[in-house]
Every structure is written in C-alpha cells, then in structure tokens.
C-alpha cells in the first residue's frame, strides 16, 4: 500500500525554533500571516535551553536572564498564539520554489509556503576541521556537547579538563565544569586576545584562577582508549606551532570551543548564495536571500554573540516574510554593502536605501578609539574599544538615508582616531 | 562441554571474516576469535577502500597472483551481501611527459597479471572529460576501468553477519594468548586455542591476525613470520563535495607505495591519503607532518579542491612481512596451522581470492568439505533513510515509529537504524558508526553523541557511564553531576 503524503499551504514557514525562528514566527503571526514553525527538537528554544547561566536579555529587557528564562518569554507567547508549531519534525528537503517535505510524528507532509525563514542556527566545529593530529580516544568533544551532557543529561564527561578556544562557549563551560567539581587545567587560545565577551573572561576564568594561554594551541592528543593527555604549543604570527615550545598536560577531557559554523544545508539546497567569510547566506536588510521569498536569520546567517540581536533580526526577517507573502515582493535592494578597512564582514550584504536599517560587523583585530563609519558620508559613530570577539551593531536612521542616495556601494569602515 | 571446532580463525578483519563466510558454505564448525569488541577494527577499517585493478603488483609475487582474481570476484561478494561497491575506474596520472613510459610499464605489468581494459590516455580533453577537476598539468593517465571502491568496514560487517547467520561462532573481546599443539593425547583435536576466558579445541587454525600475525605464528613455534607496521594517514572530506572527484586518482607509484591518492569513498565522501611511514611499534596516531604531506600530495592532483571541507583524519597500519609479500600457506612448524599474514595492500582486493585459496589449502590438508544445503549467501542491509524518496519515507516511518526520530542530522540516520545496528551486534559508538554512518559526517558526532549514548544505554540495559566509544576504557561519561536538573 502506498502511504499518502498530505499537502498543505502556509503563508510563512519558519525552520528552526531557537530565538531567531521564534521571533520571526511571532512577528509573522502578529501581522496576520498563517505561520508554521518547525523544530526538530522536542521543545522550542534552541541553544538557549542548555545555557543555564545568566546573561541573556540585557539589550532587549535590561535584565540578566538565564537562557531558558529568555526562551520562556517567547514560548509562552507562541503557545497562546495560532502559530502551527511542529516539534520533533524534520525538513527533508526545501526546493527553490519553497516546497518543503516534512517528516513529523504524524506522517510526511508537503508544505507549500509563500515565504520561508531559515533559522537553523549553527553547529560547532569538530576536531577534524581544525586538524589536530594524534590518537583518537574518547574524551575529546565540542564544548556544546559537554554542555548538553552536563546541563541536560546530568553527567560529567570528565574530571580533569582542558579547553581549547576562548569563545563564550569555552569560557562558560570552564566555569560550569569548575562548579561541578571538575578541575579545569587551562584554556588555550590561538589568537593573541580572548575571542569571547570580556565579561565572560573575567567571570568564568579570572574568578576561578583558570589560566588562559594566549597564542597557544593543542598540537597532539594522547590516549588509545580514553584521553590521557594533550600537547600544548605556542604558535607564531602565522598560527604555526613553534618547535621547542611543546608541553604535555595530563587531562581526561579536551573540550573544543573553536567556533560555530552556520547550518547552511538548506540554503545550499535552495540555491542561495553564501558569504564565504561567514558560511551563512547573503541577505538584504529584511534578511531576504538572493532566492526570492527565502529569508534567513540568527546564527544561520552569521554567528552572533548576544541573543538580543538574534531576536531583533528574527523580528525583522518576520516583517520581510510577511511583506513578501502578501505582495510577492519587497523594495529592490540593489545597493551592495561591503566590508572596508579593518572590517572582517558586515551584514546585511545589500540594502534598498529606502528604509531604515541596522548593520552588524566584526572587526579584523582589537582596536581602541575608532570610528565606525560609512565611507563618503557623515554616518559615523565612536567606539572606545572594538574586538573581533564582540559584534558591533549600528543603525542607519530614516533621516540618514538621504546620504546614501548617490552611493552605489555602501562601504563600512573602522578607522582609528588617534 | 567445550565445543570442538573444525576450524578456528584468529582475527576478524576482512581476511578472517571473509574466510569464515566462505567456510560457512560447508557443514563445518567454525569459530572466529577477535580481540576487539567488533569486526574489522584492525587494518580493515582504515585503508583506502580501493579494489585495485591489479597492475601495480610485480608479476610473479603472491600479491600479484591474487589481485586481479580478487577484483574479478568482488561483485560476487558485494551483491548478495548488499555492500556499497562501485567500479568507478582508476587513474594513474603524470604531469611529466618524459615519464609516460612508466605508465607503459604498468600496462605491461597489468597485462601479465591478467588485468583487462587498461588504456593510456594522452588527450587532455578526454582526461578532463573523465575527471573534470584534475590538475590542468596532467599530461597522461593510465585508465583502469575495472578498479572500484568498497566500504571496507561495511563489507566486513556483512561478511560477519552472513557467516554468523550461516552458523559460524564469533567470539569478541577474545584475544588469543596461546595455542597448544597436539599435547593432550585424550583429545582428538590438534590445537587448543586459548583466550583469557575460554579454550577452543580445533583441528585447523587460521592465523589472520593482521599486524599481529607474526606474534600469533610464534604461539605454535613458527618464527618465520616477521611483520613490520607501516602507517598510512588520511584526510576525509564531507560528502558535500560528492561529484568533485569521480575516479580513483593515483600519482605515479614509488618503491614503497602507490602514492597519495584522491578518491571518492564508496559512501560518497572524498578521501586523501595515505603516506607511508615505517614504524617500530604499531600506532595509529596521526601526525602533523604526515597529515601535511597527505594534504599537499592531494593538492598536487586536485589543486582546486575545497580543503575547508575536511571533517576528520585517521591512520591505518600496513602489515609488511619481511618478504614484502603476502605470507599464505601451512606453517612448517605445525601441520594444520595456516598463516594468512602480511596481508598488506592490496589485501582488501585480494580477500575473496585469498578466501578461496585458503579453503583449497584446508581441503588439500585433509579437511572434508560437504556443502551445507541450508547455506544462504544473502544478507539484507539496514534500510537507509537517507537514500529514500519521500513516498518510501512515508511508508517506512508509518511502519516504524523509531524511524521518525532522526538522530544524526549530518548523515540523516534514524533511531530505527541505530537500534537495528545495536540489534545486529554493535556494542559501542564506533560499532554504530561503521554500521550507520552516524558520527561520520560534518559535525563528527558533536550533535548526536549525547542521544546515541542514551539509546545505547537503554537498548543494552546499562548505565550511560558504561557506554564506550570503542570498548575497553573508552568511556564517555565519568560521573553524575552534583544535581540533576
Ligand atoms: C554556550 C553559549 C552561551 C551563550 N551565552 C549567551 C549569553 O550569555 N547571552 C546572550 O545574549 N547570548 C548568548 N549566546 C548566544 C545565543 O544563545 C545564540 O546566538 C542564539 O541562541 C542563536 O539563536 P538561533 O535561533 O540563531 O540558533 P539556535 O538557538 O541554535 O536555534 C536553532 C534551532 O533550529 C533548530 N533546527 C536546526 N536545523 C533544523 C531543521 N533542519 N529542522 C528543524 N529545526 C532545525 C535547532 O534544533 C534549534 O532549535 C550563547 C550561546 C552559546 C552556545
Ligand atoms: C594505509 C592502508 C591503505 C590500504 N589501502 C588498500 C586498498 O586501497 N586496497 C586494498 O586492497 N588494500 C588496501 N590496504 C590493505 C588492506 O587494508 C589489508 O590488506 C586488509 O585490511 C588486511 O586485513 P586483515 O584481515 O589481514 O587484517 P586486519 O584487518 O588487521 O585484521 C586482523 C584482526 O586480527 C585481530 N587480532 C590480532 N591479534 C589477535 C589475537 N591475538 N587474538 C585475536 N584477534 C587478534 C585484530 O584485532 C584484527 O581485527 C591498505 C592498507 C593500509 C594500511
């Protein structure tokens, strides 16, 4: 017997129920669209669910919430709305024409959407991607997996740990391990500055006397069955290990916090162009990609350090999706936004210049007393300290749009004042 | 009472498992003893997975005599056992027009070894048509259309399952530590094979212990087998690059090895490797120098390949006998003890031919072979969700609720697949990995490991703390957290 595939239609389908997807879905529904929100996990919330530390919502609410508390503000709103939430549901395919094959606990569906928002978040880089040689024992894992074991499953993945990478995940897991009675022998960072938020360096490492080894990396892994130790080496300015600086450290756990990569499979499947710098999709000011009607927001576009920005981007993508689902188009975004001096990347990649917008950027190196500006305009703002670890967000207001009229290309630059 | 075996096989690599499967055609009691918790965890799981055409081995060597015949027989193994195997053809390329004669030598060697359809291509356009992304500098290639790729661990798992279904007894976590020969007059068997937990009386013993075959031979007083390990390292790339490389690509071979190759693996990823490093002691640890060598070697043939898609690296050990050839035959030290050692490359290719040959030796030495009418050559694979069309998925998931949970999101592996792998014998995360591909994709288990630990512990009725990556001390979890949220 051939099983039926049920066909349904929705104005907007949001894939991914983390903060980005929840915001997009909420905005879509508020504006009167029929919205489906697809999440593969058993609950909404995304990464927030495993982040039981404080520090979420400072920009949005002026409060320091835990991840689950922050998520709850959105999940409760979604529960009392008409949003069609599909949990434990997997998108099998997404076509450029916005037809989605969906596997749910209730069968397989084919969903035709007017607009699709991809909010699939990011995944952690693995040992293989950064090519650490050595043995292949158990006890080497991404920090996020360890966080899940500890915070969601109630198990400690080791007793004596070393953490590679000083991003926020690495910093926060170091403190968590310490609280749980494990010994964190050290944190190593290949750059000459910590890549996580400064407050996390203080609160997670300094407060617990955990040494931070800048310009160091793990160059070997020992242990046939279980991890027995690692080799730590200093690196030169090209990030190559310096011979003679190797030091063996005995540990039973090595956590990797060496970066997140946007989950971009569906963008690729739908033929969306990606930014090689971020591995996320190229988007305009409404977070629309270059495939009409396909939007993206949150960590799926670029790795954001504060959930507040993720939420705001999700709202904006929701606005875009509503407009597109209603009229089939949005104002043409034909002004390219490019990364200029000292800027690693900037999002969005294109704007229409007809509507106020926000842009987010990361600098290439830590700097002091700088102006973040759009070249050839008076649009500029002063910052005392900028580092690649902290995303900078600037607004271009309604009044400032005039200044962009004559520009074909908007070049964002960061320049030192003195 | 201890079961008495006609044949005891030491080692469940592709050689031991292959011989066991071929012996299961007959009415015999066969035991396989393996020191690891699973099949194929020696050299068999970490190699290039190439079913060589057979032109590389020097004519007249034992290797040469088994290569082309092994290749010809591959379909006979892969089809009934449902193992991923594709004859995609191989290239040996040179960028130096002065060295085309080397290709000619390979053709002549191949013809002597019985390889068919070899051709040298010097037409750039034709080369690029067959392999679009190969370096523009390649002047000539030797094309061997009969070469193929197989998933070596899947093949060995299939051989094991089929042998087991046909009555062979497998004993895992059973390192052989000694063998008594014909000592106790009361017993009728010539050998008593001893592991820490059990003794196995047997008339014939087959030594298929890979890099340890010298050690096992010496257990019966045979000191003629000397094995030296030589490591080969690899990079594995994400299946996203599927199609970028279509053939098995070798540079010109050197004295020690066939060089660093670039090939699609049977299951869709691309691999680079191996290098060749002779070692004093066996070690499958990878090294920075070795991985760099492999990386550069691959770029030589495919300068444009996206190396950011590297997902992992690994190494395997060649079992090099002193003679630099396979050591196959009855030992001079003990009648009925058959060495099948030193099976370096192309041992995977040769495996079906070796199995037939070894059975021939057993028969010649007096083992009587009666065909078992109940023998079934087929083995069903675990249904693969990732290869299903939406209609099939609708049916599959309707019939099986565990199929609705996708556990590994890089390779799209369902809980049903994981559970079936466990039912079929996987006891560890690596055992599940080799059967289902979970943890083999781009995130390397970052996402699914916590769930896999849960499923494995539930299915096996053990605490999550007892779940291991690969047996013996390779636990994942040290202890409970202070308070469970
Ligand atoms: C350890 C850690 C600490 C942090 N600390 C802070 C902090 O203190 N303060 C702060 O403001 N921010 C913090 N952040 C950052 C913030 O949590 C993230 O930026 C934010 O969660 C990203 O939101 P997202 O919705 O893009 O992605 P996610 O939260 O990852 O959500 C993506 C969702 O999509 C789902 N999904 C993915 N693919 C599919 C699919 N194919 N089908 C269905 N569903 C799918 C996933 O299951 C997931 O639920 C932290 C992040 C981490 C990891
Ligand atoms: C880098 C590399 C690349 C290669 N590429 C190819 C290729 O592309 N094509 C090809 O045809 N061949 C290739 N080969 C060769 C091929 O991998 C081997 O010939 C083949 O795997 C050998 O299988 P085996 O069963 O003899 O050895 P193994 O797979 O090593 O099996 C031996 C088994 O014996 C067990 N064992 C050892 N001692 C004991 C004991 N005392 N008690 C119980 N059990 C024991 C081990 O645990 C192991 O499982 C390659 C080899 C290497 C190293």
Image (cartoon, rainbow, N blue to C red):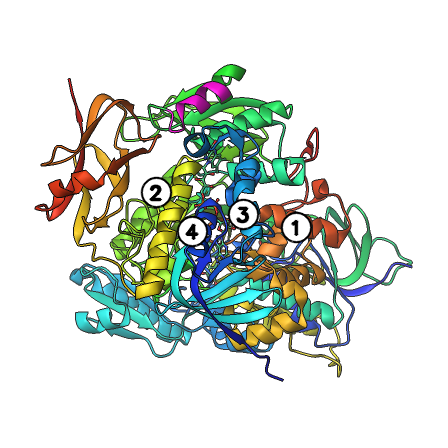
Q: Residues within 10 Å of mark 3 (few under 14, many from 20)?
A: few
Point out the stretch of residues depicted in magenta: A194-203
A200 in the magenta segment: yes
Q: Residue shown at 77%/76% (left/top)?
A: B27
Q: Residue shown at 72%/67% (left/top)?
A: B164
> Which residue position is annotated with label 1?
B428
On whether disc 2 and disc 3 are found on a single subunit, the reply is no
Check contact, mark 3 vs mark 1: CB within 8 A: no
Q: Which mark identifies residue A77?
A: 3
Q: Is residue A378 visible?
A: yes
Check contact, mark 2 vs mark 1: CB within 8 A: no
Q: Residue shown at 32%/45% (left/top)?
A: A278
Location of residue B146 in the rendering, given as x and y in whole percent from the top left corner: 40, 75
Look at the picture and state if B158 lies above or below B377: above
Q: Is residue B241 visible?
A: no
The CA span between labels 2 and 1 is 31 Å
Location of residue B45 in the rendering, given as x and y in whole percent from the top left corner: 54, 55
Q: Of B47 and B118, which appears nearest the observer?
A: B47
Location of residue A220 in the rendering, given as x and y in whole percent from the top left corner: 46, 33
Looking at the rendered image, the disc whose residue lies closer to the viewer, 1 or 4, is: 4
Q: Chain of mark 4?
A: A
On whether disc 2 and disc 4 are found on a single subunit, the reply is no
Looking at the rendered image, the disc whose residue lies closer to the viewer, 3 or 1, is: 3
> Which residue position is annotated with label 2?
B292
The CA span between labels 2 and 4 is 50 Å
A254 in the magenta segment: no
């Amino acid at each position: 017997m051939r099983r039926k595939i049920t066909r349904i239609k929705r104005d907007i389908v949001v894939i991914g129920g983390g903060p980005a997807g929840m915001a997009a879905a909420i905005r879509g529904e508020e504006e009167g669209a029929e919205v489906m929100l697809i999440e593969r996990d058993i609950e909404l919330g995304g990464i927030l669910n495993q982040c039981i530390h404080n520090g979420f919502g400072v920009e949005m609410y002026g409060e320091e919430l835990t991840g689950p508390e922050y998520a709850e503000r959105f999940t409760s709103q979604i529960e009392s709305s008409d949003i069609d939430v599909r949990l434990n549901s997997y998108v099998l395919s997404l076509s450029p024409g916005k037809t989605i094959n969906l596997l749910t606990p209730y069968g397989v569906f084919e969903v035709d959407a007017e607009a699709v928002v991809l909010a699939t978040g990011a995944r952690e880089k693995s040992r293989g991607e950064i090519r650490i040689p050595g043995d292949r024992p158990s006890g080497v894992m991404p920090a996020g997996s360890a966080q899940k074991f500890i915070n969601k499953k109630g198990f400690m993945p080791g007793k004596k740990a070393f953490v590679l990478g000083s991003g926020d995940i690495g910093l926060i897991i170091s403190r968590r391990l310490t609280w749980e009675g494990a010994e964190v022998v050290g944190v190593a960072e290949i750059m000459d500055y910590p890549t996580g938020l400064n407050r996390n360096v203080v609160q997670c490492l300094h407060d617990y006397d955990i040494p931070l080894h800048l310009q160091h990396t793990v160059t070997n892994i020992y242990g046939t069955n279980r991890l027995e130790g690692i080799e730590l080496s200093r690196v030169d300015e090209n990030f190559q290990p310096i011979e003679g600086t190797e030091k063996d450290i005995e540990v039973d756990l090595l956590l990797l916090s060496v970066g997140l990569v946007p989950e971009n499979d569906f963008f690729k499947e739908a033929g969306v162009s990606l930014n090689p710098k971020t591995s996320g999709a190229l988007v305009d000011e409404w977070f629309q990609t270059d495939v009409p009607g396909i939007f993206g927001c949150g960590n799926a576009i670029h790795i954001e350090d504060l959930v507040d920005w993720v939420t705001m981007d999700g709202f904006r993508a929701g606005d875009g999706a509503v407009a597109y689902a209603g009229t089939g188009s949005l104002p043409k975004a034909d002004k390219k936004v490019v990364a200029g001096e000292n800027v690693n990347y900037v999002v969005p990649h294109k704007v229409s210049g007809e509507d106020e917008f926000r842009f987010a950027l990361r600098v290439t190196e830590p700097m002091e007393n700088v102006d973040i500006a759009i070249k050839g305009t008076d649009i500029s703002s002063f910052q005392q300290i900028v580092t690649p670890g902290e995303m900078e967000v600037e607004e271009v207001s309604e009044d400032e749009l005039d200044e962009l009229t004559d520009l074909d290309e908007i070049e964002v630059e960061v320049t030192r004042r003195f | 009472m201890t079961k008495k075996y006609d044949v005891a096989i030491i080692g469940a690599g592709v050689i031991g498992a292959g011989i066991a499967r071929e012996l299961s055609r007959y009415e015999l009691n066969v035991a396989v003893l393996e020191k690891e918790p699973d099949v194929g965890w020696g050299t068999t799981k970490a190699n290039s997975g190439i079913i060589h055409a057979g032109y590389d081995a020097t004519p007249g060597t034992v290797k040469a005599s088994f290569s082309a015949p092994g290749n010809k027989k591959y379909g006979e193994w892969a089809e009934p056992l449902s193992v991923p195997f594709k004859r995609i053809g191989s290239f040996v390329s040179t960028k130096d027009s002065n060295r085309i004669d080397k290709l000619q030598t390979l053709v002549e060697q191949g013809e002597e070894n019985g390889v068919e359809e070899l051709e040298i291509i010097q037409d750039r356009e034709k080369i690029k048509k067959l392999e679009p992304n190969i370096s523009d500098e390649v002047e000539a290639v030797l094309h061997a259309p009969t070469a193929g790729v197989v998933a070596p661990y899947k093949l060995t798992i299939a051989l094991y399952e089929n042998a087991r279904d046909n009555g062979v007894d497998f004993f895992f976590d059973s390192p052989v530590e000694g063998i008594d020969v014909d000592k106790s007059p009361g017993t009728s068997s010539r050998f008593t094979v001893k592991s820490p937990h059990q003794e196995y009386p047997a008339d014939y013993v087959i030594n298929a212990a890979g890099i340890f075959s010298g050690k096992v031979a010496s257990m019966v007083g045979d000191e003629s087998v000397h094995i030296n390990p030589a490591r080969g390292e690899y990079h594995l790339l994400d299946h996203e690059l599927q199609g970028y490389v279509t053939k098995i690509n070798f540079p010109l071979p050197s004295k020690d090895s066939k060089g660093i190759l670039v090939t699609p693996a049977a299951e869709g990823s691309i691999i680079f490797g191996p290098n060749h490093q002779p070692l004093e002691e066996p070690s499958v640890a990878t090294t920075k120098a070795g991985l760099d060598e492999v990386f550069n070697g691959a770029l030589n043939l495919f300068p444009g390949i996206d190396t950011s898609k590297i997902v992992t690296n690994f190494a395997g050990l060649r079992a090099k006998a002193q003679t630099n050839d396979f050591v196959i035959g009855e030992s001079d030290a003990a009648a009925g003890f058959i060495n099948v050692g030193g099976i370096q490359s192309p041992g995977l290719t040769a495996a079906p031919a070796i199995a037939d040959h070894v059975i021939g030796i057993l028969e010649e030495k007096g083992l009587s072979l009666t065909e078992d009418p109940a023998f079934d050559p087929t083995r069903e694979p675990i249904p693969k969700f990732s290869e299903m069309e939406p209609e099939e998925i609708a049916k599959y998931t309707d019939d099986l609720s565990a199929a609705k949970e996708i556990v590994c999101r890089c390779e799209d592996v369902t809980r049903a697949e994981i559970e079936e792998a466990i039912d079929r014998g996987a006891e560890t995360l690596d055992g599940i990995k080799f059967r289902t591909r979970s943890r083999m994709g781009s995130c390397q288990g970052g996402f699914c490991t916590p769930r896999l630990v849960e499923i494995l512990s539930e299915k096996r009725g053990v605490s999550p703390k007892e779940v291991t990556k690969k047996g013996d001390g390779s636990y994942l979890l040290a202890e409970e957290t202070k308070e469970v949220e």
